[in-house]
């Protein structure tokens, strides 16, 4: 059978669902009607659904212990948004900060010919904002890699 090469949903653990939802509203994202205020928020995107759920509830659902105070801040995961130009990356970084997010790494040229910045939401969830000239965006804003 095999497992399909896709993902349907990314769930970010957050300390306060309402506060996290307000941040994503401030960056211009629209919440799906299926959200449950104060419990879980969903944001439909062309590539999948982003969910915001309380960290303790997410850990409980996965049968894992909740992060403890001395857990490392970096979670070894970054979600990326690709843009059509370097200017769009810079604009997005500015909007992110205005909405209450933080810059982890300022936008800069990369060794592979792109341009990226790393930003974090108020809960420390890491996002890469990137322009990759080798991956043109389709009409949905998704990168086209290797002609796919």
Image (cartoon, helix red, strand yellow):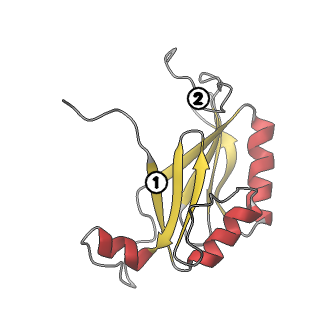
Question: Where, by quadrant of the figure, is residue 81 drawn?
Answer: top right
Q: Is residue 107 above or below residue 62?
A: above
Residue at image location 59% in from the left, 39% down from the top: 46
Percent x, y of residue 73: 45, 71
Q: Which residue is mark 1?
A: 10
Q: Residue furthest top?
A: 147
Give the SS element for disc 1: strand
Residue at image location 68% in from the left, 43% down from the top: 108
Mark 1 vs mark 2, CA separation in Å: 18 Å
Q: Is residue 101 visible?
A: no
Task: Decide which of 52, 72 is in the foreground and name it.
Answer: 52
Q: Which residue is mark 2?
A: 143
Give the side of residue 2 with respect to residue 102, left or right. Answer: left
Percent x, y of residue 78: 49, 52
Residue at image location 41% in from the left, 63% down from the top: 75
Give the side of residue 86 with respect to residue 9, left or right. Answer: right
Give the side of residue 79 with respect to residue 139, left or right. Answer: left
Percent x, y of residue 96: 73, 59
Q: Is residue 9 above or below residue 57?
A: above
Pointer 1 or 2: first along the chain: 1
Give the SS element for disc 2: loop
Of the residues tagged 1 and 2, which is closer to the observer? Answer: 1
Task: Decide which of 29, 145 is in the foreground and name it.
Answer: 29
Percent x, y of residue 123: 56, 72
Give the side of residue 8 with respect to residue 89, left or right. Answer: left
Q: Residue furthest front?
A: 33
């Amino acid at each position: 059978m095999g497992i399909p090469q896709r993902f349907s949903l990314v769930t970010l653990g957050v300390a306060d669902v309402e506060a996290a939802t307000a941040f994503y509203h401030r960056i211009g994202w629209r919440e799906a009607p299926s959200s449950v205020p104060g419990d879980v928020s969903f944001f439909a995107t062309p590539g999948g659904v982003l969910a915001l759920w309380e960290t303790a509830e997410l850990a409980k659902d996965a049968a894992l212990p909740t992060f403890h105070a001395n857990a490392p801040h970096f979670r070894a995961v970054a979600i990326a948004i690709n843009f059509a130009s370097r200017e769009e990356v810079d604009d997005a970084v500015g909007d992110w900060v205005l909405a209450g997010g933080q810059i982890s790494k300022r936008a800069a040229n990369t060794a592979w010919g792109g341009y990226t910045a790393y930003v974090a939401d108020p809960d420390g969830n890491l996002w890469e904002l990137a322009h990759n000239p080798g991956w043109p965006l389709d009409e949905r804003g998704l990168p086209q890699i290797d002609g796919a």
